[in-house]
Image: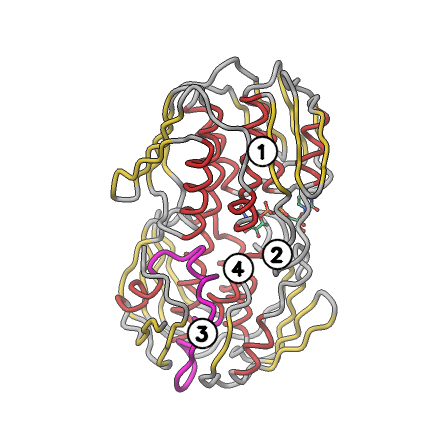
Amino acid sequence: MSELKNIMRIEGGVPLNGTIKAQGAKNAALPVMAACLLLKGGSLTLDNVPDLYDINTMKELLKSLGVNVKDLGANKVMLDVPENISHEAPESLVRKMRASSLVLGPLLARCGKAVMPLPGGCSIGSRPIDLHLKGLVQMGAKIEIKSGVVYAKADKLRGRRIYLDFPSVGATENLMMAAALAHGETIIENIAREPEIDNLADVLMSMGVPIDLEGTGCVRIKGIDEVHSGSDKVIPDRIEICTYILAAIMTGGQVTINNIIPDHIDAILAKLEEAGAKFKVNKDSIILTPVKRLHAVSFRTMPFPGFPTDAQSPMAAALSIAKGTSLIEENLFQARFLYTQELNKMGANIDIKGDTAIINGVESLHGADVKATDLRAGAALIIAGLAAQGVTQVSDMVHVWRGYEAIDAKLKSLGARVELLD
Ligand code: UD1
């Protein structure tokens, strides 16, 4: 993992040039790692696990529960799970990362009980886990929340039909893992359709769980008594891919990105095409060619296959120098526009009205000292800095290390002038 330095200094104005390979998806790796907790003796071997701060937090969390985490090199990880593990997730790790709540479903299903502090909100908005808990209760769990800690119990969860009030990614994942060891069949309706869900289904199937992911917002899972050792590969990170696509476009660069799954980034490519970007998509790669300037486009963030909220801020950075006025409506996280104040320090002209960002495209950005307010905000500021005239310093890089593997080295390999400072 790159040294966790806190500032990235960027000399902007250099078109990116060259070829990079996408990392494994953070948001796919986290749930599939948590799935190892279903094992009572056995291992889960995962390929293409990205080397990230959040992944390290999940490794620490699994270790704290008794899992033996073995790094096999080349982004391969083996999770060895003994017969007996702890059912109590430590507060210090759960508070570090919201996705820690993904251990709740598998721990409860496998140990018959689980104790987990509530992960709380984060800088992009309040993020409750009520849908996760409601589904588990419907499966027969008894849940109490005392002083911000969830105490869940169920001798044996029961499969049943569950309708999710919202297609939450995390709730879908937690309930799928819980259903793997429940008695009978669980049918979850109105599930998230993000590609990360298919990845989790593949991993659970590799562990012997019969799953029918119908592709229509519904999944059927036949609970079994015991899962067996499994293995799989983490899918490419669609948000990292979009970030580099936008960096290439903003700097007027010629960049090829390998190891992509084009279907996963359809919504973004459609918007970029509408904005006048030029690219060629192959089976598992994309080649960006330079265009002078994008035109304004408008969109709203939605669950998959809609435009992903995680690509909202990098896209806003690109539209800040497009011709005309773009509107972005954020529908998932209420505080996801904090970064626009930072972009405005670089000369962007963005107004926020409620859930909508009004981006009046300017001719160019200039360098400034700015602060990453969250993971994707940090990425947006970095790509803005790459396109800006002069020097930008992005501080609070700690957020960026949560989701971008070796972003400094990757950008350097494309000719960017970036360095990390303490
Ligand atoms: C996952 C992703 C995150 C992405 C998000 C939406 C991971 C580790 N993180 O987060 O990067 O931005 O999907 O694509 O995969 N909600 C509730 N109650 C719940 C659960 C969710 O009200 O019990 C709300 C949330 O506050 C939010 C919306 O539903 O407004 C979407 O959340 P969800 O789909 O659950 O996202 P995460 O799984 O947290």
Q: Residues within 10 Å of mark 3 (few under 14, many from 20)?
A: many
Where is residue 321 shown, x and y percent of the image?
Answer: 51, 79
Residue range (magenta) = 381-406
Q: Amino acid at mark 4?
A: Ala
Give the residue at mark 4.
311
Which of marks 2 and 3 precedes in the sequence?
2
Figure coloring: secondary structure
Q: Amino acid at mark 1?
A: Leu
Work out whether residue 335 or residue 324 is closer to the camera in this orientation and state it.
335
What mark, if any, has residue 122 been given in the picture? Answer: 2
Is residue 339 found left or right of 23 in the rendered image? right
Label 1 and label 2: CA atoms lie apart by 19 Å
Give the residue at mark 1.
104
Image quadrant occupied by the C terminus: bottom left
Q: Is residue 211 above or below residue 382?
A: above
Where is residue 239 shown, x and y percent of the image?
Answer: 47, 55
Question: Which element type, helix, strand or loop, lies under badge 1?
Answer: helix
Does label 3 point to a residue whose CB lies under 8 Å from ligand 1? Answer: no
What mark, if any, has residue 170 been given in the picture? Answer: none
Which of marks 1 and 3 precedes in the sequence?
1
Which of marks 4 and 2 precedes in the sequence?
2
Q: Amino acid at mark 2?
A: Cys
